[in-house]
Amino acid sequence: MNRLFIIFLLALFISSCGNKRGELIGVKQKKWFPEKPFGMTLVEGGAYIMGKSDDDVAQTQSAAPKTVTVRSFYMDETEITNSEYRQFIYWVRDSIASALLARKSFEANLGEESENSISEYAFKDADTSDISEFTKYMRENYYDLNEDPYFRRPLDMDQDIEWSPEDYEGFEYIEVMDSLYLPPEIWHNGEMKIDVNRLIYKYSWFDAEAAALDRKRNPNNRDRLPFIKNEEVEIYPDTTVWIKDFNYSYNEPMHNDYFSHPAYQDYPVVGISWKQAVAFCNWRTQYKNIYQREKNDPLVNSFRLPTEAEWEYAARGGIPSGIYPWGSPYLLNDRGCFLANFKPLRGDYASDQAMYTVEAKSYLPNDFNLYNMAGNVSEWTGSSYDEGSYDYVSTLNPNMSKRSENRKVTRGGSWKDVAYFLRVSTRDFEYADTSRSYIGFRTVQDYLGSEKVKIK
């Protein structure tokens, strides 16, 4: 009887498989048509000699030459600009305001039919008749069981936030918005200022390296929870770096205007710590994937900081033995013009036509179409600094990355550095929680293929 029952189930299963004929055909997923990320250029991977093939002028002995190979990746053509970073800040600012308005609406028990303007900002799941079965399930089994009544409740980000006081409507709205500004007693020139200490970006990430090492030591351990890290980062740039970095120097105009004035919107953002740059990468990934989900398209892979090896490979622009990104050992072109923004002579910052930074798309790009890979601002990488790391890192996609190591590699030299730091092989570092007036960053994304081209 049992045997007949098993045969019946087997026949039923086979018949349910349609016309697949028992062949291995794979699981078909939605077709993916990749696109080049906006503002990025493809750096095709390959092998090169990483480190100093020329004289070690500073005798640092920290970049012994080593042949390595890196995979293909996309890289921002320019450093991240003030305008681009401000988009990040505005998104976080609007998200915080939306969350506060939604909470205020919840506390006031205002429904969608309420005439109170703040009801427009209610949580997306406030109207339970219009939410998906999945959201209902999550609320009943996870969200509603949490002590925090606002835990993971979806915000309605489609509602525009009014930031001009003249457009505020209703006492509740004014009360929420007022909480985001500095108190009037510390305004100056009568100008309202956002309390930038409240601009905090929260995100989580999975520490795959630590999990892999743990699995190596404890093969039977399947617990992922210890390796999910939660971060909270204050994201507003430290504009005081223009004063702190230079003793007995008048740089208040840069402190007052560099990040906020439209005149500097296309200049590289500075005053950003390594932790803030990593937070920006996470946000950029999430921001793009929100759009991908709306289109029901596959998610893009993560934006991140380049590894030290990737940065040097990109800076070389395909010229294996080049000292600078443009290849030649000279700092001027055949017309006597400087090829980068740096400090050419002792105390003379302006002979290269720039006293501080210049716009991110200045000077000629290298052969990978990357601008200012030497000079303008030094750039954070995702790698940790160790003087002897070149001796032990892998020859395949080398990277020394330790969260416990607070020193992070910076590359490229800046507007206030001498030519030595502009060399593609020169290594430097700064502490991850430190920001400077001469350090910025650019992001990369792993290459997963090109768009299909239809052949006519």
Image (tube, rainbow, N blue to C red):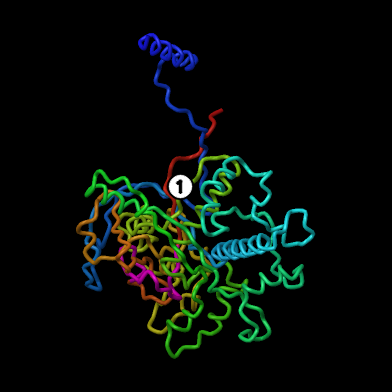
Task: Locate residue 262, reporting x and y percent.
Answer: 62, 71
Q: Report crowding for label 1: few under 14, some 14 to 19, many 20 or more residues within 10 A (C-alpha).
A: some
Classify the position of the N terminus by image quarter.
top left
Residue nearest the observer in this picture, 1 or 27:
1
Question: Compared with residue 294, is residue 389 higher up or lower down, i.e. above or below?
Answer: below
Task: Locate residue 248, reporting x and y percent.
Answer: 44, 91
Question: Compared with residue 297, is residue 66 higher up or lower down, i.e. above or below?
Answer: below
Instruction: Identify the residue at horizontal 71%, vertical 68% (top origin).
Output: 173
Task: Locate residue 182, reporting x and y percent.
Answer: 61, 79
Instruction: Identify the residue at horizontal 76%, vertical 62% (top origin).
Output: 117
- Label the magenta part by its dominant secondary structure: loop
Q: Quadrant of residue 307?
A: bottom left
Task: Locate residue 369, reporting x and y percent.
Answer: 46, 55
Question: Compared with residue 122, is residue 289 higher up or lower down, i.e. above or below?
Answer: above
Classify the position of the C terminus by image quarter.
top right
Q: Residue furthest right?
A: 115
Tell me the element at label 1.
loop
Q: Which residues are magenta?
A: 421-441
Q: Quadrant of residue 320?
A: bottom left
Q: Residue furthest front?
A: 1
* Residue 237 falls left or right of residue 319: right
How many labels, in total? 1
Residue nearest the observer in this picture, 101 or 232:
101
Residue 170 is at least partly visible in this image? yes
Residue nearest the observer in this picture, 351 or 227:
227
Q: What amino acid type is highlighted by mark number 1?
A: Asn
Q: Does the segment drawn in magenta span residue 432? A: yes
Judging by the rendered image, the residue that carries numbered circle 1 is 301
Instruction: Identify the residue at horizontal 67%, vertical 57% (top origin).
Output: 122
Residue 375 is at least partly visible in this image? no
* Residue 120 falls left or right of residue 301: right
Q: Does the segment drawn in magenta span residue 156? A: no
